[in-house]
Image: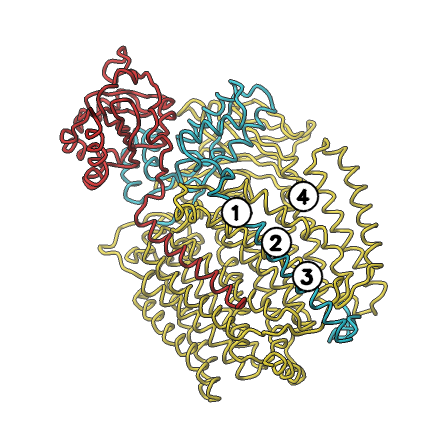
Amino acid sequence: MTPELGQLALILALLLALAQGVLPLIGAWRGNRALMAVARPAAAGQAVFVAMAFGILVWAFLHFDFSVRYVAENSNLELPWYYRIAAVWGAHEGSLLLWILILNVWTVALAAFSTKLPEVFAARVMAVMGLIAVGFLAFTIFTSDPFGRLLPMPGDGADLNPVLQDPGMTFHPPVLYMGYVGFSVAFAFSIAGLLGGEMEQAWVRWARPWTNIAWGFLTCGIVAGSWWAYAELGWGGWWFWDPVENASFMPWLVGLALIHAQAVTEKRGSLRAWTILLSIFAFSLSLLGTFLVRSGVLTSVHAFASDPRRGVFILAFLTIVVGGSLLLYALRAPKVAGGKPFALLSRETVLLIGNLMFAVASAMVLLGTLFPLIGDAMHLGRISVGPPYFGFLFPLLMLPVVLLLPFGPFLRWGKGEASLLKPVLLRAGIAAAACAIVAAFFVDGKLKAIAGVAALVWLGVGVLLYALKRWREAPRGKRYPAELAGMLLAHLGVGVFVAGVLLTEALGVTSDVRMAPGQTQHIGGYDFRFDGVQRTTGPNWRADQGTITVTRDGHAVATMTPQKRTYPRGQVQTESAVDAGFFRDLYVALGEPMDAGNIEGAWSLRLYYKPFVRWIWGGGLLMMLGGFTCAADKRFRLKRIAESAPVGALQLQETRA
Amino acid sequence: MMRFGRSAPCARMLFGTITRNHRAQGALLLLLLLFGGVLHAQAIEPMPFANHAQELRFQRLTAQLRCPMCQNETLADSNAPIARDLRNQIFQLMQHGQSDAQIKHFLVDRYSDFVLYDPPVKPGTWLLWFGPLLILLAGGSVVFMVVRKRHRDGIAAGISTDSGPTDNGDDW
Amino acid sequence: MSRLLPLFGFLLLVTLFGFGIWWNTRHDQTAIPSPLINKPAPAFVLPELYDPAVKVSKTDLLGKPYLLNVFASWCVECGVEHPVLQVEGPTLGVQLVGYNYKDAPADAKRWLAEHGNPYHVLLADQSGDTAINFGVYGAPESFLIDARGVIRYKHIGPLTPGVIRRELKPAIAALSKEAP
């Protein structure tokens, strides 16, 4: 198969995306059903051509077609087939193609599941998706062609960056993109809502499951990335506040706010303008992330090679999409606060406070990430903003959220009862305090660790109390609807996550040591015996592999084999060894021989004892699961469009008054 | 070429490191020049700390400082030669009884505020440090006004804010 | 009006990004401006490369302005810079002081024999400790130091004919103007 076919497929996809983006909009405006009906077939056709282009690139990688520049730059004859597939999204051009493919997956899913939506509304939603695709396809075709030829064809290619040669990496980008791109659906819904100016409450119900699923994927993608950084990069850290990490974290935070704002808007009709704004922000921040990673504007260890031309193109695209939608928002957003009124003490109020904190946290991350650029602009010199800044402000902003979280479900919509909160405060508070006191003896009085235990108990008991209340009060079969169960799971996840973070930070032990074969180091209650280094080889690397036998009180615990690999193009890559456990990880990374060249002698090693580190990702996965569970709620299935329409029409008059 | 490694050192130093470590491998250097290789290894360096407290202090301090070379790495994490030299320097200064503030001062005098991951609070960085507070206050007052207005609306309209069940007949 | 706030905020961001793209086409992202400009150069005592018994100190070099050029045999970009220094060095009108950074003396000598030696004085800093006082973090780097031992200008990365014409020569000209 020739790569030029891939190029042709992309161009055809672009034409179809144009048709999908423009014709249904005109149709919706003119009331022309034929034009509106273009949306679905155009989307399907576009997806076929994009999948074809993607397939052709995969094919080129699998068949070592080094006449394709992208293939030659990112793979070689020794690279195993599974990493050759992962190499498709290992650099800028291919990962952009993956982005587009996933956008098409979402669009096709939307086309399939939106058949019961009002025709005009669905046409507008599909059109917005089409316009987004136009931008990205044009970006690929005009600035980042993955099918460009390299002549004469080299005999062998370069290599996929060894850092990316890891199972976590094959998994992380697609899932992350599922999240990023998924926010385009909520975005398309709110733009369609703004364009039509109707049924503001109804569209939110349709958008909710999509938002929850997108957020779940984004959570999963971030967890996968964090896990990969921990296992692969070798510093034992799980989050570095690097601009590129922040670029994924900002849409996550805004998405989190959006999920909660949507609940308010859907159930009570309030916060409509805010929900629309958040939908725009969530997707805008996803685009912004793409911009930051690919424009070279910020210095990051993860950034793709920068090219000002690409930067300018994405910036222009960003300006049109985000600027256009914010202008539309300014013109058409509901001007009168609608919905049912609520008291000072109500679920709406706490959700608003939560929303405020997530939005401020996201703004803080944005400010910190961009401040070096502001420093350049204001001639302050080169400025670095890093972990000490974010690590100080972020917990402060999240503290009120953690403190208020258990009360949220107990507060009713409209007007909550203080009398219901007191027992929660007492029970969860006493449980948390008691556990904190007990924990203090086990953790040497380390405050962070005590706070971690207290937070877990506080949030866990809060969730448990509400689960019990439902068990007692709700009728059998209606006790735990999916939406509620998802909420409880996600809130529990917050507790597990916080505990994991604080306990790991407080109790973790790190040590750089020099070890000769036969020597033993005692760390975190474990004895690490270094049994020397041997040479070993893999499919496309050779390595020095250390053997470390870990025992505890004389009982064997694990045999760990950290490696220092050398890949065919000379890149050196450390492979840490991790012995995972529910309560602790043991982690060993191999440094260098103390006596250069003598691999049989002493080596420098880094040993970690990381208690509860897995809870960080466990908490994240619970949150993800919560998002997916919510989306599965029966209420979100489209079946009664007719019923919600009159409500919307009524509100339309109210807002235009 | 994508720079994805945490320790992708800058080209200026990268080749140097490799030639020094593998002096014999001239061919390797050539390959690297052709393909722009990535050296990825983390900084592992045992040091003769006086005690465990000093080791912890060293780890904490080097994790707050930025390696002047490379993309975006702490002195603790970076494997660039200058990071090694600076770690050694910090270790020496610690042995001479210098405080964290004095050590940071030493580095800032030579490498500017760039090495500090938490920029000092001064007029130029007020936006950074107080900006979030400002946003919080602004957002907080908007939330406060919205809640108060909605509360009063409810009372004025005589609508009971007492919650009935939601649309789906469930109050949660 | 408040409905327009997000749009204005966003336009501000776009301006910032546009600035960022422009700025990065003009500036090396890896260069950190030195805080030592217009401050006295740090005191140092370093062995001469070819005769380690001879120690050169800061005071030995006072009285005439000089260009301190940090180089090393392992540094690829120094190989790019070197021919430029060979040609342009004599036209600068200041002394060229070579600062051999973290290098084995034998390697440095072989490298100079191969590429030529434009330097009037050659210092060897094998450990790189003194270089930290100069705020050196890689090679090549160049410092223009005036007759009173004050650092007046620093360039990070290889000196090119363009840099020499646009930045270095004007800086040297400014020095000679203020000289009595």
Residue type beneath disc 2? Leu
Chain assignment, label 3? A
A316 vs A620, left or right, is: left
Which chain is rendered red in the image? C
Residue A178 appears at what percent x and percent y?
52, 62
Q: Earlier in the sequence, mark 3 or mark 1?
A: 1
Alpha carbons under labels 2 and 3: distance apart: 17 Å
Residue at the spot of label 4: A582
Q: Which mark is residue A351?
A: 3
Alpha carbons under labels 1 and 2: distance apart: 37 Å
Q: Quadrant of the C terminus of chain A?
A: bottom right
Residue B67 appears at what percent x and percent y?
43, 35
**Which numbered disc, 4 or 2, marks the residue closer to the eye?**
2
Q: Quadrant of the N terminus of chain A?
A: bottom left
Residue type beneath disc 3? Leu
Q: Residue at x 39, y 36 (%)?
A: B69
Alpha carbons under labels 3 and 1: distance apart: 33 Å
Residue A459 appears at what percent x and percent y?
74, 51
A492 vs A77, left or right, is: right
Same chain? Circles 1 and 4: yes
Chain assignment, label 1? A
Q: Which mark is residue A228?
A: 1
Q: Earlier in the sequence, mark 3 or mark 4?
A: 3
Colour applied to chain B? cyan
Residue at the spot of label 2: B137
Alpha carbons under labels 3 and 4: distance apart: 33 Å
Q: Residue furthest front?
A: C180
**Which numbered disc, 3 or 4, marks the residue closer to the eye?**
3
